[in-house]
Amino acid sequence: MTHTPNGIHHVTAIAGSTQKNLEFYTGLLVLRLVKRTVNVDDPGTYHLYYGDEAGHPGTIMTFFPWSGAPRGSLGAGQTGATAFSVPQGSLGFWHERLRAAGVPVEDPKARFDDEILAFADPDGLRLELVAHDGAADLEPWQDGPIPSQNAIRAFHGVTLIERSLEGTADLLTRRMGFDEIGSEGARHRFQASNGGPASRVDVLVMPNEGFGQVAVGSVHHVAFRIADDEQQNRWRDEALADGLQVTGVRDRNYFRSIYFREPGGVLFEIATDPPGFTTDESVSDLGSSLKLPGWLEPKRQELERTLPPLTLPVGEPVTS
């Protein structure tokens, strides 16, 4: 099927402090603030997007910061970890950088043919850096704040925690076009048909695990990329005919989205590549000002009073 999803588009999680989130992802992990907008379902809350220099699908980590909200609990039916690709030989740099910043970080370990560095962000969200040969072929942020040979390139993949494998595996392979490419113990690896960056989904089978609670420090949903509106509509029609409960198309300004829960309970999204993050900002200006959908522009002044001010780690306030 030519209209199956083509790997991961973005991962969206829930944060606590907006400023701490910004400092961690742009200051420590050195992702770029690609877009500063609002949660269209809760416009008094930011929606922050981090990614590579140009905001390509497959690099985008997004957050809804809800200060004062409770911490979530990790369990079945959740995304257990989000992994980023880094070049071979860079984990020493990242281990030292994270420890120097006071971030608890595990020693590197092997998984499949890769080397993994596991840690968590300030809200307890589980993250991994995966060093592998293919990362060197991905374009880094050339003029970023750290040496480009160490820079995060894109997503490597996500780990889903599931009580059973069958339903999720059937969805990934039969409906979404992934191939199962290996297993290590309870971990089963699936890869999108293109085999490129951001193409892997690991399913960690834990039959006795309790279900988790999505809140601060949790992934809200995983979005998979699809080429355009036509292919998204075709995929939705076939999924509905197959019995999946899929939402209607929702316009998110930078992509169009449909949502459903996979059999184990994780919220999935299918997001179009276009129109992209440069539809209202040039590459050089990405993330430099608050962007609102047209229907919220009349409330701009009210929202700017409500939303907390943000300061980038270099000390320059983000303008409105």
Image (spheres, grey):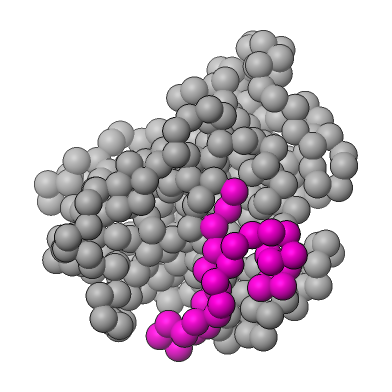
Left or right: 134 as drawn, with respect to 206: right
Instruction: Find residue 176 and report its horizontal and vertical position in percent.
Output: 28, 62
Quarter residue 97 falls in: bottom right
What residue span does the magenta drawing correspond to?
94-122
Quadrant (top left, top right, bottom left, bottom right) of the N terminus: bottom left
Instruction: Find residue 144 and report its horizontal and vertical position in percent.
Output: 81, 62
Instruction: Find residue 72 and report its horizontal and vertical position in percent.
Output: 40, 42
Q: In the rendered image, is residue 173 in sight? A: yes
Quarter residue 306 falls in: top right
Which of 53/231 is in front?
A: 53
Q: In the rendered image, is residue 271 in sight? A: no
Can residue 97 be found in the magenta stretch?
Answer: yes
Which of 170/13 is in front?
A: 13
Quadrant (top left, top right, bottom left, bottom right) of the C terminus: top right
Residue sitting at x 13%, y 51%: 242
What count of labels does the image hold?
A: 0
Which of 26/34 is in front?
A: 26
Residue sitting at x 58%, y 67%: 105
Can residue 57 be found in the magenta stretch?
Answer: no
Task: Please determine whether, in this image, residue 291 is positioned above or below residue 232.
Answer: above
Residue sitting at x 66%, y 73%: 95
Left or right: 304 as drawn, with respect to 259: right
Residue sitting at x 63%, y 85%: 88
Which of 99/116 is in front?
A: 99
Left or right: 152 as drawn, with respect to 283: left
Task: Please determine whether, in this image, residue 180 is positioned above or below residue 84.
Answer: below
